[in-house]
Amino acid sequence: MADQIDQANDLNEQHLERSLRAARQPIAVGVPGECDNCGDDSPRLVGGRCARCRDGRPR
């Protein structure tokens, strides 16, 4: 019978596995150019948008 510490360790291992899987996702290739959303020049556009527009940060 598992006690609370064993259950907590199992939960922690599951969380670590999910986090590692999420971190292994490929990074989208960017291209330099003008952002389709704000019009600023950016060294890396992904899907035509700069990092600030992709993140939803205010200008």
Image (cartoon, rainbow, N blue to C red):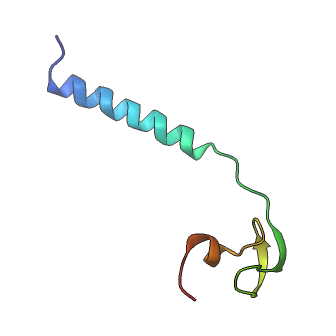
Q: Is residue 50 above or below residue 24?
A: below
| Residue 11 at x, y percent in the picture | 31, 31
| Residue 12 at x, y percent in the picture | 33, 34
27 to the left or right of 2? right
**Across the whole image, how many numbered discs are drawn on residues?**
0
Q: Residue at x 63, y 76 (%)?
A: 53
Which image quarter is the N terminus in? Answer: top left
Q: Residue at x 70, y 85 (%)?
A: 38
Q: Considering depth in this image, is 37 or 22 the residue closer to the camera?
A: 37
Rendering quarter of residue 36:
bottom right
Rendering quarter of residue 6:
top left
Q: Residue furthest top?
A: 1
10 to the left or right of 32? left
Q: Residue at x 70, y 53 (%)?
A: 27
Q: Considering depth in this image, is 3 or 47 the residue closer to the camera?
A: 47
Q: Is residue 40 above or below residue 6?
A: below
11 to the left or right of 31? left
Q: Residue furthest front?
A: 37
| Residue 57 at x, y percent in the picture | 54, 79
55 to the left or right of 50? left
Q: Is residue 29 above or below residue 11?
A: below
Q: Residue at x 62, y 78 (%)?
A: 52
Q: Is residue 35 above or below residue 11?
A: below
| Residue 59 at x, y percent in the picture | 58, 89
